[in-house]
Image (cartoon, rainbow, N blue to C red):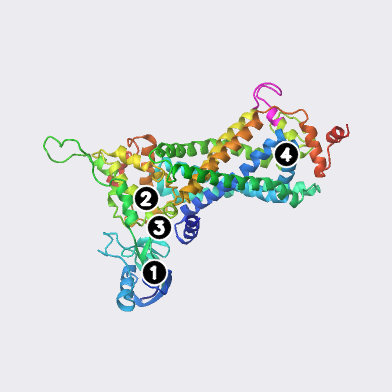
């Protein structure tokens, strides 16, 4: 902690120029994205495992708190992506370093240029949504729905620290690795750059489809067209139907072949999770070098969290869909107090 | 003429009353815009407070012993002129001087350089070649191009301006730091040296080059204008590719030579 506080206060005091601010923004934006990624992968897996919970999660996403968070998230992703490109360019062409200041300002400029129209489109959706006196999940329920995540994160941290303490007792502590670590860090350095570039088109595609073209409010609009599904309609007006219809859309046709969006989401999940949690490992281990116990815990925490997300998200993507999923989603909407679609009324009535 | 207020970070471990670092201000009349920060520190020490502790030796930017943080940036006190810090120079200026960060402060502006030199020694900063001498028993030849590859990193004077400007080093004193990597670069890219693989292996460890997050604080901090972040980047590429071949292109070197 000392090391983190010292670095933060001195980074504010040291007049290091734009490069230093780019680095701080890159870390902060990365941490923001990883936090939302954790919620989002687990939430989305509920569309398959617990459709009721998924409806509640999407209702939370449609609440004002998450709307603010969505704007912040998009800003984080866009900045992190552009600044990442800058880092990759100067990593592979160190002789161009003289342009790095201009490049850092260009990243800020491009981020602003990208965000202005994106935010405008998102804002139009928000205004349009609230113009129809929509259902809004109360802040108490929104926060309550996030409580399991807070508990899960705390449990994961305590678990990692306990595990690290135990390993320390068994091995007598000290620094893990040594010379064997050299190829390890070299691999991760290359991976972060390659994965970062591969993520770019995937994550921008995802952002455009899910936050700009068809925002989060459209997920539960009965009768709306589901984006990327050759014109399928969301009959039930449940977020569950939206997700399942997309994952069932395949390259070959509506019912055969491998799911187009499943493949897309598997690629995105794999790259973003590994990139994100290795980035988190970088941040956590940077400030715990003088405390081997915490440093090990940081590695365990990111490893465990990354594996959990990959398993949960992967299982949801590969699992079969329960035929009763939509019924459960309809029931959940009723329980939340939403106005039900005709489809849901018929399902619940029957 | 300029009136200077010198705000200095003081610390005296022998003062039992006040064991914490504190700021102290000194007023200096009639300074010249071409005066160096070192001149002003001398005036304070010689005319106002003889207890002020600072390290300096040659006082001409060669020995590298008076690195300090001046107005928020690392530089050598003997190379920082008032007119470099302010342009145009007003009638009265305030200059803040504090020790470089990341190394233990011994007294006032003097830090313990030993951890810094320990990292320097880690990279084996000396010429290694156990091959038999050339037939004439004299020097090992090298083309001008080969010499030019590491010319920039021969300029380092080990003042620690770069290493103590690095947020990664502030956070983690075990990181070898920019200066040690610059010194390693000087031998890694020397065609006559035979220990490239060993040095690359040392710098490939978790507290080697990978702790560099390309923040670029080190490059403008260097009083010798060494392209520090570039040198670190070239070492990273050499580790990643497992060879120094093709990383610094000779054609560019020729341009540099003909331009200078």
Q: Are marks 1 and 4 on the same chain?
A: no
> Do the residues at discs 2 and 1 belong to one chain?
yes
Residue at mark 3? B102
Same chain assignment for discs 3 and 1: yes
Distance in Å between CA atoms under marks 3 and 1? 15 Å
A87 to the left or right of B247: right
Residue at x 31% of width, y 50% of height: B120
* Residues at discs 2 and 3 in contact (Cβ within 8 Å): no
Q: Which residue is mark 2?
A: B178
Identify the mark at residue A54; answer none if there is no mark: 4
Are the numbered discs 3 and 4 placed on the same chain, yes or no? no
Specify the segment rendered in magenta: A245-259
C-alpha separation, residue under disc 2 versus residue under disc 4? 49 Å
For residue A74: magenta?
Answer: no
Give the letter of the chain under mark 4. Answer: A
Q: Say which residue label 1 marks.
A: B11
Snapshot quadrant of residue A125: top right
Question: What's the residue at 70%, 39% (across, down)?
Answer: A214
Query: Which circle marks residue B122 in the picture?
Result: none
Spot occupied by residue B44 in the image (x, y as percentages of width and height): 33, 75
Q: Residues within 10 Å of mark 1 (few under 14, many from 20)?
A: many
């Amino acid at each position: 902690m000392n090391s983190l506080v010292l670095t933060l206060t001195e980074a504010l005091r040291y007049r290091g120029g734009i490069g230093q601010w780019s680095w701080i923004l890159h870390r902060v934006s990365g941490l923001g994205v990883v936090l939302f990624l954790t919620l989002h992968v687990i939430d989305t897996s509920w569309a398959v495992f617990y459709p009721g919970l998924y409806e509640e999660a999407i209702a939370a996403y449609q609440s004002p708190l998450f709307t603010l968070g969505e704007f912040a998230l998009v800003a984080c992703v866009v900045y992190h992506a552009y600044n990442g490109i800058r880092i990759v360019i100067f990593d592979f062409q160190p002789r161009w370093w003289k342009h790095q200041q201009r490049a850092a300002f260009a990243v800020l400029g491009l981020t602003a240029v990208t965000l202005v129209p994106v935010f405008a489109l998102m804002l139009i959706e928000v205004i349009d949504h609230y113009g129809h006196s929509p259902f809004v999940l109360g802040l108490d329920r929104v926060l309550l729905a996030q409580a399991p995540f807070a508990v899960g994160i705390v449990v994961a941290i305590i678990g990692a620290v306990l595990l690290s303490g135990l390993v320390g007792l068994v091995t007598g502590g000290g620094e893990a690795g040594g010379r064997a670590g050299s190829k390890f860090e070299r691999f991760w350095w290359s991976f972060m750059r390659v994965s970062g570039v591969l993520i770019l088109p995937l994550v921008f595609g995802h952002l455009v489809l899910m936050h700009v073209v068809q925002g989060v409010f459209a997920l539960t609009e009965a009768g709306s067209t589901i984006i990327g599904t050759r014109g399928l309609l969301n009959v039930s007006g449940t977020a569950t139907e939206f997700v399942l219809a997309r994952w069932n859309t395949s390259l070959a046709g509506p019912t055969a072949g491998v799911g187009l969006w499943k493949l897309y989401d598997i690629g995105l999940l794999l790259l973003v999770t590994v990139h994100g949690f290795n980035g988190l490992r970088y941040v956590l281990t940077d400030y715990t070098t003088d405390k081997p116990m915490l440093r090990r815990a940081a590695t365990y925490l990111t490893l465990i969290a990354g594996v959990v997300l990959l398993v949960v998200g992967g299982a949801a993507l590969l699992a079969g869909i329960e035929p009763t999923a939509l019924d459960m989603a309809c029931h959940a909407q009723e329980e939340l107090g939403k106005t039900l679609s005709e489809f849901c009324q018929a399902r619940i009535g029957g | 003429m300029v009136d200077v207020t010198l705000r200095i970070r003081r610390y005296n471990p022998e003062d039992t009353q006040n064991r914490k670092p504190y700021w102290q201000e000194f007023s200096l009349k009639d300074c010249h815009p071409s005066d160096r920060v070192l001149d002003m520190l001398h005036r304070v020490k010689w005319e106002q407070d003889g207890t002020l502790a600072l390290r300096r030796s040659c006082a001409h930017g060669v020995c590298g012993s008076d690195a300090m943080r001046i107005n928020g940036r690392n530089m050598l006190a003997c190379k920082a002129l008032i007119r470099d810090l302010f342009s145009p120079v007003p009638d009265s200026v305030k200059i803040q001087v504090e020790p470089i960060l990341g190394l233990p402060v011994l007294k006032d502006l003097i830090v313990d350089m030993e951890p810094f030199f320990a990292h320097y020694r880690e990279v084996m900063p000396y010429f290694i070649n156990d091959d038999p001498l050339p037939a004439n028993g004299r020097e090992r030849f090298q083309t001008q191009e080969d010499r030019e590859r590491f010319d920039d990193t021969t300029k380092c004077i080990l003042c620690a301006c770069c290493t103590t400007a690095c947020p990664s080093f502030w956070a983690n004193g075990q990181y070898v730091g920019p200066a040690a990597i610059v010194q390693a670069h000087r031998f890694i890219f020397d065609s006559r040296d035979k220990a490239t693989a060993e040095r690359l292996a040392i710098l490939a460890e978790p507290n080697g080059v990978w702790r560099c997050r390309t923040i670029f604080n080190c490059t403008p901090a260097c009083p010798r204008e060494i392209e520090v972040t570039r040198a670190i980047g070239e070492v990273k590429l050499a580790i990643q590719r497992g060879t120094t071949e093709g990383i610094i292109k000779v054609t560019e070197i020729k341009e540099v030579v003909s331009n200078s």
